[in-house]
Amino acid sequence: MAVVYKKADNIITSLGFSTAENFEAVVNGISGLSYHPEGTLGVPEAFYASIIDTSKIEEAFAQISKEGQLTRFEKLAILSVYKACSNIDIDLSSNTTLFVLSTTKGNVGLLEKQNENDFNNDALFLSHSAKVIAQFFGNNNNPITISNACISGVSAQIVAKRLLNTGKYKHAVVVGLDELTKFIISGFQSFKALSVDACKPFDANRIGLNLGEGVGTVILSVTEDESTLPKGTIVLENGAITNDANHISGPSRTGEGLFLALQNIMQGRKTEEIGFINAHGTATPYNDEMESIALTRAGLQSVPTNSLKSYFGHTLGAAGLIETIISSEAMLQNKLIKSLGYETCGVSMPLQIITQTTSTEVNKYIKMVSGFGGCNAAVMMKKIG
Amino acid sequence: MKLFIHKYCHITNSSLSINGKLLYQNTEELASNDFLTTIYREEKVAYPKFFKMDNLSKTGFLAAEMLFKETSIYGEQPKLKTGMFISNKSASLDTDEAYQKTLGEEYFPSPAVFVYTLPNILMGEIAIKHKLFGENTFFVSELFDYDSIYDYVCETFSETNMENALVGWIDYYHNDCAAFLMLVERENKENWIEFNTKEIVKL
């Protein structure tokens, strides 16, 4: 039975340009979110979000390439893949290396320039971005692009795992990314989904989410023999993707899709095996309530649970990757990460929300996500002991 | 893993066909979205939410409707073992452009438009209509990536207890509508075509 495991990773957010910097900030309870006054990114209303400093991106990118024709989106993805691979020996240009891009909106920020002369309309297509990223590394396979709303980052890892299982590829470079743009912020504002302060996942006083921008990259590899993997290797055991079949923009009241995904990945496993659950925890009233119902229906309400949204904001196509990478690092270091912003239970089915970052043995955890279009996904991650 | 194509549907700006048999022709040369509405009315679907959908969702919705009707999938009963694996080139760019227009000098972003700026919403619409709780993933590629979609669908069937799935291509951009959707099944009931890349290319 083929086993898919993580070889390397990288995170880029306002908290830093490496996984280590981001993880350290999270362990120290530091959030990347801040207040942005009206007019920021051309948005007429103020908002609270995590934004990566463009001058830092340019500076970091100049150190790896002189390529000037790339968009900010493409540079961010390339930087993250480059940094993820800096300490491992894999041939990114090989026909056995597959690139998988997870994004909801790609270069959508360029849309406001669509009416300008010499605008390159191709750049708006997500598959174009995926090609640019893969070809930067000399890879000529058809890259896979996943655009599955807020579950994209977890979907992309499941897709990579299944395609690695076919035996056609040895490695998959899974990069998830969305930029913060006027397009995205205005949309969430129109939904009245944004909190004007730092978000409070699962708390009684939560009023909405914060957006964030970031990149998460994992390099996944496959082996036929798990016993060859060194101690501490992170394995993507299994994953499931489901739908609520209920509403295109609101979560199911019964948590149907998420419950089914959790039930699926828990098959043959006991609750006690699960060290913690990293929830989607957007801090909108409906999402967190739905998650509490789904977790309780799946018998997982006693497992320590957190949300990382109050550190990074909701990073959309990157969320499933960034949050999996941080959670895997927490499992590796045997830590439970505090769910920042939580004080009082604000969901109808009480959960064990983690209120202090503490040390405890962790060998498995669950990452779960839900998104517009009624989609849900969950993965079971384990550590080789 | 052997899988089978129960039915397949093509929609273009000028026609809709099932299993290669022409069912609707756009003889009046209507705009694609009006042609879709004509088919909806002829089919007597009676699903008012159709009119709220963007053109990408309308295309996917109609293709699914045509494939599911007269099968056991049609109807209100929950289906836990039906998946969706749909791809296209333009993602939701057609609606993205419409939404972007609401952010100009007259700033008036609409949540009803914004929600359709995600391509997987079309799978959400199909899931709601047909009560599909199964696997659903939206892929974006310049051309239909037969090889990867085939591999992914086979792998997902073998890893899960999925019984059938909608697999194909649904694209809508600048009045250009293109759909090729298959209903793929685990069991072969009536000498259906085998689901493999050679056969898919022929369809």
Image (cartoon, helix red, strand yellow):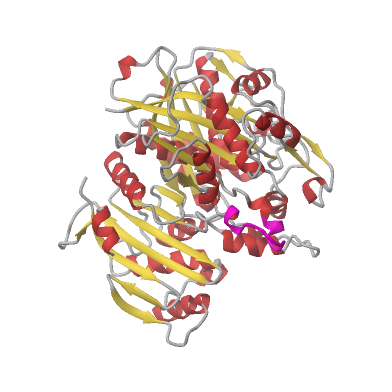
* Quadrant housing residue A348: top right
Q: Is residue A18 above or below residue B26?
A: above
* Quadrant housing residue A195: top right
Res A149 visible: yes
Question: Which residue sits at x=78%, y=61%?
Answer: B107
Which of the image's four quarters has the N terminus of chain A?
top left
Question: Which residue sits at x=55%, y=42%?
Answer: A290
Observer-nearest of A314 and A293 = A314
Residue A328 horizontal/vertical position (percent): 51, 23
Residue B143 horizontal/vertical position (percent): 42, 56
Res A348 visible: no
Q: Determine if the magenta segment contains residue B135.
A: no
Observer-nearest of B68 and A162 = A162
Observer-nearest of B51 and A145 = A145
Q: Is residue A55 above or below residue B168?
A: above
Q: Is residue A131 above or below residue A235?
A: below
Which residue in the rendered view is the most extreme toward the front? A66
* Quadrant housing residue B182: bottom left
Question: Relative to B10, is B1 on the left or the right?
Answer: left
Residue A286 horizontal/vertical position (percent): 61, 45
Q: Which residues are magenta?
A: A111-123
Which residue in the rendered view is the most extreme toward the left? B191
Question: Relative to B45, is A10 on the left or the right?
Answer: right
Which of the image's four quarters has the C terminus of chain A?
top left
Q: Is residue A60 above or below residue B163?
A: above
